[in-house]
Image (tube, grey):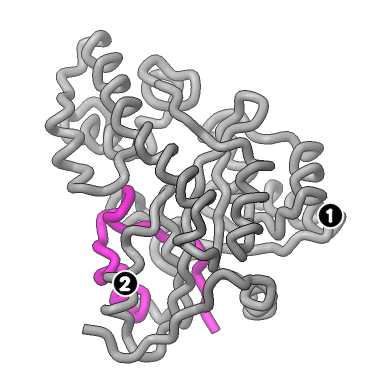
Amino acid sequence: MRIDLHCHSTASDGTDSPAELVRNAAAAGLDVVALTDHDTTRGYGEAIDALPEGLTLVTGAELSCRVDGVSMHLLAYLFDPEEPALLAERELVRDDRVPRAKGMVAKLNALGVPVTWEQVERIAAGGSVGRPHVASALVELGVVPTVSDAFTEEWLADGGRAFVEKHETDPFEAIRLVKAAGGVCVFAHPAAAKRGRTVPESRIAEMAEAGLDGVEVDHMDHDADARDRLRGLAKELGLLVTGSSDYHGSRKTVALGAFTTDPEVYGEITRRATGAFPVPGAGGA
């Protein structure tokens, strides 16, 4: 089995619609794909309706969190999307994305970059607006060559010249909410140092005690040393190890299935989840 547990659609900051995502996942030879858009479950219905036969969909979301002033992302799988407390928190985070993006546009304008909110809004195309949309605007304007090049201290990285904070959930509260909604929690790309400051291992240990299920180890932003270190930490803390592409369509160069999760780990994730179940493909539309 080939299992990719971290992918984005146009419901947040990917360039594939949810339907295109599942069709492309099947074409890439995946058996299981997770839809983990940022702080939203809006793409679920379209992805399920288009799900090809032979492909299983894991519903999820990538939750925006912050601890000790450090931004981090928590992958939540197979939770009940209608559970009121977790739904309210996702909406709070999502609602803060628009004023945050407008703040970044204002900072960029002050730096002499002629980006406009209308441009960012067009790029987001109704999705959950975020920094990648602002970064794509910088690419369109020729300010940076790629989206990744916008995530530096010069521009949009944490603490960068055009960075603006948004509401982000305390990860311990996020873990509690996801668990209460029957979901499973995995720390996304915890050693992605090029994105900014990372959460110390002592904090990851505290999260493990609080119910964190796993860490995403095999990821494009982790070099070999980081993967070895995270595998050792996961073994020490009794955490599951996952691997994922963090696919965003054409917004990033990584391909679907570039990194995958062991079938036994996937099986354990599905055993632990009580809020929702993986959806098998029935042919799609």
Q: Spatial distance from mark 2 to mark 1, Cα to Cα?
A: 34 Å
> Where does the image place residue 65, in percent across and percent down from the top left?
56, 38
Q: Tell me residue 241's x, y (percent).
A: 69, 63
Q: Earlier in the sequence, mark 2 or mark 1?
A: 2
- Find the magenta span and give its range: 1-27
- The answer to whether 34 appears left or right of 74 in the picture is left
Q: Position of residue 177 (x, y in %)?
A: 61, 51
Label placed on residue 226:
none
Location of residue 27 in the rendering, given as x and y in whole percent from the top left corner: 32, 80
**Three-letter amino acid code at disc 1?**
Leu
Q: Which residue has dot 1 on it?
A: 237
Q: Residue at x 81, y 54 (%)?
A: 232
Crowding around mark 1 (Cα neighbors within 10 Å: few <14, some 14 to 19, many 20+) is some
Between label 2 and label 1, give the one nearer the viewer: 2
The secondary structure type at the circle numbered 1 is helix
Q: Quadrant of residue 207?
A: top right
Residue for point 46% across, 45% down: 88
The residue carrying mark 2 is 47
**SS of the residue under disc 2:** helix
What kind of residue is marked 2? Ala
Instruction: State the residue at coordinates (54%, 47%).
Output: 221
Dot 2 surroundings within 10 Å: few (below 14), some, or many (20 or more)? many
| Residue depicted at x 73% and y 51% | 230
The part of the image, by quadrant, that contains residue 201 is top right
As drawn, the residue found furthest toward the right would be: 236
Magenta region includes residue 8 = yes
State the residue in front, 30 or 84: 84
Relative to 124, residue 197 above or below: above
